[in-house]
Amino acid sequence: MSTTPQQAELGPQRAAVIAVQLHGVDDASFGSSVAELHRLARTLGLTVAATITQRRHSFHAGTVIGSGKVKELAALTGAGAASLGDGDEKRDDEKAGATAPTGARDEPTAHGDPVVAAPIKVILVDHDISPSQARNLEKATGAEVMDRTAVILEIFRRHARSRVAKAQVEIVRLQYLAPRLREMGAGQDRQRGGIGGKGAGESSLELDRRKIRDRIAELTSELASLAAEQDTQRARRRDMNRVALVGYTNAGKSTLMRGLTGSEVYVADKLFATLDTTVRPLTPESHPRILVSDTVGFIDKLPHGLVTSFKSTLDEALEAGLLAHVVDASDPGFARQLDVTTEVLSDIGAAEIPRLVIFNKIDRVGDLAAQETTAHALVERWPEAFVMSARRPEDVARLRAHLCAFFARDLVKGEVRVPYHRQNLRGEIFASCEVLGERYEEDAVIFDVRAHPSVLERLRSV
């Protein structure tokens, strides 16, 4: 069976996680990465029943892990001992370990009869692996194998809602699938046809690859037209004050978006719950109006193709006046998550945009004393940071005031003269300026305003 993210919904199946700790990778980073893959698995609806870890100088060329660990894995999947024939029968790991699968042993019921746990059907590898490595593991274990990229792609596929997000995900999924196609058996050549009838025609594999190329070209063209629509929408907001919520996946951006704007954006305790950018005005409405956008979250080892494909979505961050970098303060690995987001923002060209670091979910670190201690430590290390909980209305109100003060720094006083026959501009003036007063002359209304210099210039030239 080919390993692709094109699979059917996985459902409540038992899974095993494979992780190799290469020399030079510290225990904290390794443990955080493995824990993150567990969360990705739960997002897919899988139950992680076992974790196979191994410390090596490099990945095994054929199966990622050594043959001894493959045999353990085969026992967990019900495939029995695997004979790989790779000459690696010795325990080539310097330090290896496996956690016993949850419920894998025969456990007695209330009547004393043993209950045999269902075998593991899915294997998740916390690394990017080659098609041949996936195929070898599948043959040895009889289970479906998904590497980290495949897991993330499957989550993206399930959570995509808009036409743009669906097209972006499908492009990357097809690019991932193309090199993993293989013949499904002999006798797959198409019948000869055409004048002369020379040659055997396209094989099934060649045909599938051509279909993928054609589909990618079709989706790319569709995205180009959709991107033009998005550019038009962003052009209308160009002179407005904009805040983009960025950060690691599941840091609480959507919950914060709800608190700041009152919008009913989707909120779930899942990785990559948000893939579509949502733009809403700050509530209660400020003058000038401040727009808040919720963007797709980042993750360590995020497939490069996804970053490239979601560039049109991330353009909201590039055009924002302020990046609100949301960090989950309750996550032990928040420092690494902060660094990952900073790297991705640098990759997309957003490193120079002003940034406000917001440590969210402070209410989850413990009791009030623990929260105060943690908040003090965070502010001591990041003096300009904002510590809060998006579920506390008073914290959201403080952040709202902070955002208003940030954009008020650039406002200047001025006048805008609007002829009576152009009173349709009143709505735009009140949305993009703080109106201090208005007076009436014989042929026009004079608005006394505070606004950004570029907004004043634009309104005066209309």
Image: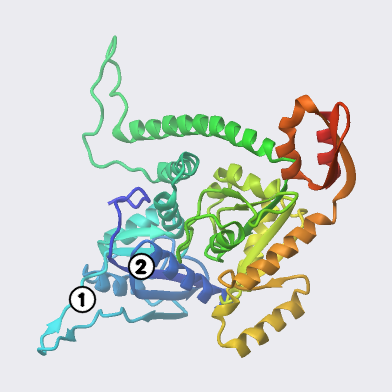
| Residue at (73% x, 60% y) in the render | 403
Tell me the kind of residue under disc 2. Gly
Q: Position of residue 181 (x, y in %)?
A: 36, 43
Q: How many marks?
A: 2
Apparent side of residue 356 relative to residue 176 in the rendered image (left or right): right
Quadrant in the picture for the C terminus: top right
| Residue at (28% x, 24% y) in the render | 200
Q: Residues within 10 Å of mark 1 (few under 14, many from 20)?
A: some
Q: Position of residue 330 (x, y in %)?
A: 57, 77
| Residue at (81% x, 40% y) in the render | 455
Q: Determine which residue is flagged by label 2.
A: 87
Q: Position of residue 271 (x, y in %)?
A: 47, 62
113 is higher (above) or lower (below) than 235: below
**One can see residue 451 in this view:** no
Q: Quadrant of residue 339?
A: bottom right
| Residue at (77% x, 70% y) in the render | 384
